[in-house]
Image: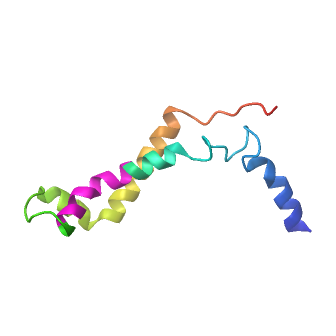
């Protein structure tokens, strides 16, 4: 009973109305997608050097970044997402 009452109370925040906490643009969180892309971009040159490109065709800095790609990607995406949320805060609208 307790779990059911929590579930019903949380439904109003699940994007069922335009003021919901999880309301996104046509079902997509565009800020998160942009942050994901920005987190991947610094790691691409090092990845391509490791997988396919001819040796020494990428600056060694990018190869070094690729050695720590998980940390670089998470840090870059986190900073980008926080910056986007600060520049344009989530606005709520009144449900009809």
The mark tally for this picture is 0
Quarter of the image with the C terminus in it: top right
Left or right, residue 69 beside residue 22:
left
Where is the N terminus found, in terms of image quarters? bottom right
In the shown orientation, is residue 62 left or right of residue 77? left
Q: Is residue 35 magenta?
A: no
Residue 2 location, x and y as percent? 89, 67
Q: Main secondary structure of the magenta part?
A: helix
Q: Position of residue 42 (x, y in %)?
A: 28, 53
Vertical relation: 63 (above or below) 91: below
Q: Note whether 59 is above or below 1 in the view shown.
A: above
Q: Residue at image x 69%, y 45%?
A: 21
Q: On the image, which quarter does residue 55 sit in?
A: bottom left
Residue drawn at the location 16% of the way across and 57% of the way down = 61
Q: Which residue of the protein is positioned furthest toward the right in this rendering?
A: 1
Percent across and percent down for residue 94 are 77, 31
Is residue 45 located in the magenta-colored stretch of the structure? yes
Q: Residue at x 21, y 68 (%)?
A: 51
| Rendered location of residue 24, percent (x, y) | 62, 43
- Apparent side of residue 46 relative to residue 12 in the rendered image (left or right): left
Among the 4 quarters of the image, the one containing residue 48: bottom left
Q: How is the image coloured?
A: rainbow
Give the magenta range.
Answer: 38-49
> Position of 95 compared to 25: left or right?
right
Task: Residue at 51%, 36% (x, y): give it.
Answer: 86
């Amino acid at each position: 009973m307790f779990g059911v009452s929590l579930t019903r109370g949380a439904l109003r925040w699940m994007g069922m109305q335009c003021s919901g906490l999880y309301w996104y643009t046509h079902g997509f969180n565009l800020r998160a997608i942009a942050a994901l892309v920005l987190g991947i971009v610094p790691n691409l040159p090092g990845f391509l050097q490791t997988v396919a490109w001819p040796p020494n065709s990428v600056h060694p800095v990018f190869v070094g970044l690729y050695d720590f790609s998980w940390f670089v990607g998470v840090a870059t995406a986190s900073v980008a997402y926080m910056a986007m949320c600060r520049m344009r805060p989530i606005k709520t609208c009144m449900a009809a």
